[in-house]
Image (cartoon, rainbow, N blue to C red):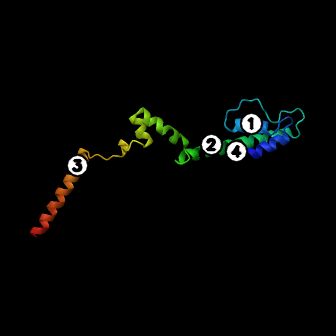
Amino acid sequence: MVVPAFIFAKLEPGWDFLDSLYYCFISLTTIGLGDYIPGDAPRQPMRPLYKICITAYLLLGLTFVMLLLHLYNDIPQLNLGLFLLRGSDLATGDPERMRLSGTGGVAPKYTQVRPTLNSLSLSLSLSLSLSLRRKENIFR
């Protein structure tokens, strides 16, 4: 964000470094207030090419920012949301939030294996057939 701010400060008339940094931050975080618009000076040299370069910068910059946010979300040590919200979840005592955050100490229900009637009957029939085969082999 700093390097494009230096470039905008040099190319845009009337923008200093802080204005350019503000524009880069506002644009790449998708706030986009519209108070600074690059390439709108009346005598901007090579204006069409400049607008295309700004569009390419914004597309690549937005992609990079979204990738960075996704990376921060995927790495637990970098995800500040888990760290900041963990105390509030424990304070409220909401069991569903504690279960989903992993702080409740209970595994999610969908990972716990419970025997069903079909699995019990299958295992019973398999063990019965194995024991009958063993008995047949003994008597031969």
Residue 123 position, x and y percent, is 22, 53
Label 3: which residue? 120
Q: Amino acid at mark 3?
A: Leu
Q: Amino acid at mark 4?
A: Leu
Q: Amino acid at mark 1?
A: Tyr
Rate crowding at label 4 as few (under 14), some (14 to 19) or many (20 or more) other CA atoms within 10 Å. few
Residue drawn at (12%, 65%), measured in percent from left and top?
A: 136
Residue 63 position, x and y percent, is 66, 44
**Marks 3, 4: nearer the viewer:** 4
Question: What kind of element bears circle 2?
Answer: helix
**Marks 3, 1: nearer the viewer:** 1
Residue 5 position, x and y percent, is 77, 42
Quadrant of the image occupied by residue 39: top right
**Marks 2, 4: nearer the viewer:** 2
Q: Which mark is residue 66?
A: 2
Q: Which mark is residue 60?
A: 4
**Marks 2, 3: nearer the viewer:** 2
In the rendered image, the vertical position of residue 122 relative to residue 31, given as above or below: below
Rate crowding at label 1 as few (under 14), some (14 to 19) or many (20 or more) other CA atoms within 10 Å. few
Report the side of 48 relative to 106 (left or right).
right
Q: Amino acid at mark 2?
A: Met
Label 1: which residue? 22
Mark earlier in primary sequence (3, 4)? 4
Mark earlier in primary sequence (3, 1)? 1
Observer-nearest of 112 and 54: 112
Q: Quarter holding the C terminus?
A: bottom left
Question: What kind of element bears circle 1?
Answer: helix
